[in-house]
Image (cartoon, helix red, strand yellow):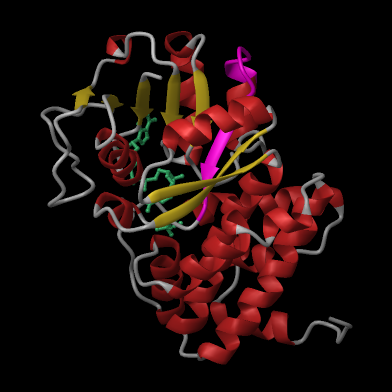
Amino acid sequence: MKVAILGAGAFGAALAVALGREGPVTLWGRGISGHVAPRLPGVDLPENVSVTAEINNLGVPDVVLLALPMQALGGFLAQNARALRGARLVACCKGVDLASGLGPTALIAQACPDHPPAILTGPSFAADIARGLPTALTLACADDALGESLQKRLSTSVLRLYRSTDVVGAELGGALKNVIAIAAGVVIGAGLGDSARAALMTRGYAEMVRLALSFGARAETLAGLSGFGDLVLTCTSEQSRNFRFGRALGAGQAFDASVTVEGVATAKAVSNIAETKGIDMPVASMVAALTEGRITHAQAIQALMSRPLKQE
Ligand SMILES: NC(=O)C1=CN([C@@H]2O[C@H](COP(=O)(O)OP(=O)(O)OC[C@H]3O[C@@H](n4cnc5c(N)ncnc54)[C@H](O)[C@@H]3O)[C@@H](O)[C@H]2O)C=CC1
Ligand SMILES: O=C(CO)COP(=O)(O)O
């Protein structure tokens, strides 16, 4: 299978490094020049990876991994769907599109209906993958035979893919954990301690499950790599941009606006969905209100702690 990766940010380049160790890969990046990974400083791309800024130079790939930021995906597909015709498409982004309220696979299915889209998601920092450290991810595809062929093609000796047909569960786990990670960062930045973070993660996980089940997801998917696994990683690691963003917010510090922080737009999108569906998502709503500057973190914590007492 001929593989192309679209998006030469940290994750796209890391996947190119991992897959390029096994066979030829084309890496497309907007405006990229040279055989480099600008968002992964110090990482060399293998010779097997050819880099291009011209989407029409992809040839006819069998598999295309879309590693763009979530809020850029819809616009990208609107412009470039023709170049992707016939390929098996794998979403590698985490979030919910604010404009449409859709996740990445629904956006892909609308623009490119040739094959059921897959999603690759789970606990994995780009820098870890690029260093060749062991990583396990979920590959979800509604068509299990297609999922199995993608699982085989995209697994390596250090990148271990588990297969699922629960696309919406895998996708929502990856989207929602970023929102909860911002909240976890706020808790730590505001000096509220590790016990408060554990409470926040647990109640945040309950929200993730509630929303995902309302979309027909399976509870065990949320308990797997793409949900619980990625929640733990992102809420507890300094490597996470969502966590660091939240921590800066909680500490009243500025944060570099050029850094991709998927949880900000997704918190807003998810709060809108939760409100429409009548689903209780207090942590996501607080993150949306905080990041929009509608409340302070002190008000958010006060609001969460003064909710009516209930059964767990
Ligand atoms: N960095 C990581 O450790 C991981 C990231 N992801 C996911 O991968 C997705 C991409 O994130 P990163 O690569 O980390 O982001 P990044 O910030 O490192 O890179 C984003 C890239 O997308 C490009 N881009 C932005 N808008 C574009 C557009 N309209 N058209 C074409 N290219 C555009 C930028 O030029 C940049 O190269 C996100 O959804 C993220 O959640 C998933 C797992 C790990
Ligand atoms: O998704 C990730 C780890 O699985 C990366 O998290 P951040 O986007 O918060 O850095």
Looking at the image, which residue is at 71% across and 42% down?
166
Q: What is the x, y in percent for residue 1?
A: 41, 19
Q: What is the x, y in percent for residue 189?
A: 43, 81
Nearer to us in this view, 83 or 130: 130
Is residue 19 toward the left or the right of residue 191 in the image? left
Magenta stretch holds residue 121: yes
Establish if 64 lies above or below 216.
above
Looking at the image, which residue is at 43% across and 40% down?
155
Establish if 132 lies above or below 27.
below
Residue 293 in sight here: no
User: Where does ligand 1 appear, by image quarter?
Assistant: top left
Looking at the image, which residue is at 25% across and 40% down?
17
Establish if 124 lies above or below 151.
below
Is residue 20 toward the left or the right of residue 100 in the image? left
Establish if 159 lies above or below 234.
above
Q: What is the x, y in percent for residue 225?
A: 57, 57
The image quarter in which residue 13 lies: top left
Is residue 70 toward the left or the right of residue 257 in the image? right
Residue 38 in sight here: yes
Nearer to us in this view, 40 or 225: 225
Q: What is the x, y in percent for residue 178?
A: 53, 59
Looking at the image, which residue is at 63% across and 78% down?
200
State the quadrant of the C terminus.
bottom right
Which contiguous range is marked in magenta?
Answer: 110-122
The image quarter in which residue 224 lies: bottom right
Magenta stretch holds residue 228: no
Is residue 92 toward the left or the right of residue 204 in the image? left
Nearer to us in this view, 206 or 282: 206
